[in-house]
Image: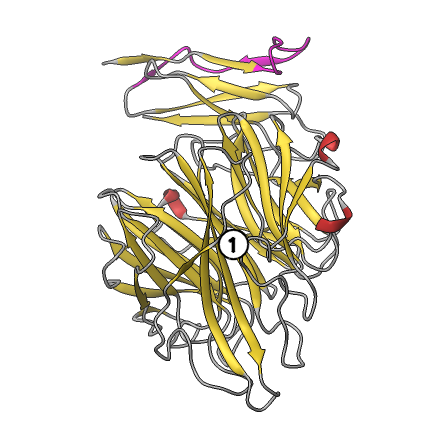
Amino acid sequence: MKKITIVFSLLTGLATLPAGAQISGPATIAAGSSGTWNLQNAPIVNSYTWSPDGTSHSAAVTTTTVTGGKLGANAAMTAADYPSIWNDNGHWYAFTISRGVTPNTTAALYRLDLGSDPTPSNTSASNAVTTFDLAALGLPASRTSHGGSGNGELVHTMVFDPDTKEWHLFWFRTGYNTGTSATQVNDLVRISRLDFGTSLANTPNTATAITVPTTADYNSGTGAGKTNAQVAQSKFIRTDGGEFILFIGTRWPDGIIRVNFGKDITNKTPKFDVLPTTVTAGIGIGSTVARSSALDVVQQDGKWFLFSSTTDANGTAGNELWRFDLGADPAGAPSEVTGLGNLPGSNHWGLQIVPAACGKEYSGFINGRGIIYRLKFPGGDLTAVPTVETASTAGSGGMPAAADNSGLFAYTYKDTLYAIMGGANNHGLYSMRLPYGYNNEMPVHKAPGDNTFTHTYSA
């Protein structure tokens, strides 16, 4: 029977195993079989590598809870909203539009220079902030509300063009901006593009407007309470055929907006449509998708899936999770819209689906007012119904108290999964270390103070 030799090592940075640490387990394993290795007395901050097939794999050894801290302390960024973070040739930058959800206040685009360290330990980044004046970039410097808080949003998303090697920031604005409370025009969706060129260290060029259809789905009517009055978390993907597609979450029940730019990200007249809201499969959460404030789009085994969660009940059975099965073509109609059940908590402002260490299994993370929930897909299969566990409570582990903490943007740094979120209620910008990987990908921390880990390898 064919044998696979396992090379398994534990590292602390560049150091070797500390005194007393041990790894025990089989030296070889039959193909198709499983083996278990126990790591005793290993500090929790370590990482491990293994090479069962001649290829080195690695992952971080973490606990099952979220820990984090504030990224910088710049006063202007205290109301950071829906942030993102990017690695530009080894240099890290975080972006946010501060006060994007605060009514009747001036907003600005901020860039936080994190250098080579995007973790909460980087306290030297406190004042490394560049403020970009929105008016100077050709964008409205503030927005108005029709009298109620939260009407109108300023959010952004970033995209990198691998062909031109250029960075582009897309800026979204919605909300009521003219008239009285009874006759205000709903400026539903306004999209502009800022070009940073080949480096995120550059000052962006003046904004270029994207032509948005004037139909009811995107720019509709007058009066308070119009549908789609707020945009929320958004996501760019690039298809296998090289098309750039943008998905925009909305906090009202008209559906998720899809914008297809084709192969040219600078296309000013992209194709718009709205994903269907009728649930065709699943049980327990109503018949329609509504208030998709958080979303992510991922590909697994050649198929694309969009996951969406809500801010609140909106007339159905609670805070909900849905999956849109887009198949091989994310520009086409979904073959199925599946209800995956109710979510705990309320006001889910951020959702991210991320691969585990080997890239085939996925975990999901949701930000619910500063409480981080983890979605675990059985077998790592995105077509399965996930279970939900609480990964952190607000105000613990270095995280801010419960509030309108918005967004969730995951990123990998030195084989460890992190995410950032914004504190729209004056809490600032936070980075957190996330637990990730399960089944065969990650050791389990059994109990506080117990540094014994088990890893199971399956061919």
Q: Position of residue 380 (x, y in %)?
A: 38, 43
| Picture layout, residue 198 above or below residue 105 | above
Residue at point 30%, 50% (across, down): 304
In the foreground, 396 or 223: 223
Q: Is residue 27 left or right of residue 172?
A: left
Q: Label 1, on which residue?
A: 156
The colour scheme applied to this rendered structure is secondary structure
Seen in the image, is 40 located left or right of residue 439? right
The quadrant of the picture occupied by the C terminus is top left
Callout 1: SS: strand
Magenta region: 11-30
Q: Is residue 36 magenta?
A: no
- Quick check: is 28 in the magenta stretch? yes
Residue 40 occupies quadrant? top right
Q: Position of residue 245 (x, y in %)?
A: 33, 53
Q: Is 311 situated left or right of 168 in this image?
A: right
Look at the magenta stretch and give its main secondary structure: loop
Specify the quadrant that holds the N terminus. Answer: top left
Q: Residue at 24%, 64% (x, y): give it.
A: 333
Q: Estimate the x, y position of residue 49 in percent, counting from the top left.
A: 48, 18
Image quadrant of residue 242?
top left
